[in-house]
Image (cartoon, helix red, strand yellow):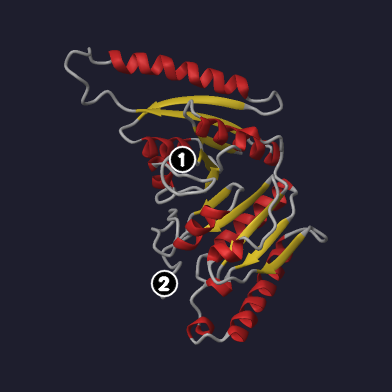
Amino acid sequence: MKLVVGYLATAGGADALALAVRFARTLGAEVEICIVLPQDTGLPALVPKGGYEEVLAEQAKGWLADAVASVPDDVVAHSHLSFDESFTDGLIHEAVRLDAEAIVVGGSGGGLAGSFSLGSVVNELLHSSPVPVAVAPRGTRQSTIERVREVTCALGTRKGADRLLDTAVRASKAAGTPLRLVSLVALDPTFGTLRSDDDAVREHAQDHARETLETAKASLPEGFPVTSTVVNGATVEAAVNKLEWHDGDVLMVGSSRLSAPKRIFLGSTAAKMLRVVDVPMIVVPRDDVSDGEGQ
């Protein structure tokens, strides 16, 4: 199993690497640290062709060497340097080439508020990647947590949730970490919310929670620690804030129905959750073209 880190010699890059190391320990995976540099097109005429690229490449090699050296001895890490017109495209190409399970990036940059402040590259990944993308909150590098403590999977009722649930179950099973299923049905547009029928909403949410719990239990060893809960709130943020979070927890969410098949597209609910949670978030791609139809 391999995890690709979209690395820069920045605080965000250090956060991403720290999260990848945590995941690698938990899953027995290898860390593939990747820097993507721009191709030497459009350089000033005074710069010899290849000269700028060579200087930048040498600097990047130094950054990669330092990054690999910072990885603890109990985790296997490799470095990769590639050139592409787009950092996002280059990173996706590396993830596909290496057959990686996920891309890990740091959330520091310009964009959303809170612990995740997404830059343009991370935003692009969260709207195009064919593999799951894990976003490390600002300050992850300062955490002393070595392994994932618990996986929380936030599920709605729209088509495509099966892929998310399956991914969360497989990840928890492989890592041996508890799985917490959170039903967000109360936050979805349903017949109950449209007519302000709170009882109908709660009943629908409880039914959904029971169904997902039984589905998860059927795929996990007997006695595996898995729980299911329903969160309610006037807003997505209010509901998520009712959940208890700990350092070492991970939140998994699915992609919007607007995403292309087998691609990530960060939906509005997930984006709102991203603003208020302080734990890493993993966004899982849609499965096929039928997901989300009729929503």
Picture quarter with the C terminus: bottom left
Disc 2 element: loop
Q: Residue 25: percent from the left, percent from the top?
A: 69, 36
Q: Position of residue 163 (x, y in %)?
A: 55, 60
Q: In the picture provided, is 285 more to the left or to the right than 233? A: left
102 to 202, vertically: above or below: above
Calculate the distance from the C-alpha at mark 2 to the C-alpha at mark 1. Answer: 27 Å
Counting the numbered discs, the total is 2
Residue 80: percent from left, percent from top: 48, 26
Q: Is residue 190 above or below residue 148?
A: below
Q: Residue at x 66, y 78 (%)?
A: 207
* 262, 64: nearer the viewer: 64
Identified at 63% across, 75% down, the residue is 208
Amino acid found under the numbered disc labelled 1: Val
Disc 2 marks which amino acid?
Glu
Q: Which mark is residue 293?
A: 2
Residue drawn at 50 percent across, 41 percent down: 107
Q: Is residue 16 above or below residue 83?
A: below
Furthest residue toward left: 45
Left of 292 or right of it: where is 214? right
Q: Of marks 2 and 1, which one's residue comes earlier in the chain?
A: 1
Q: Where the N terminus falls, by quadrant?
A: top right
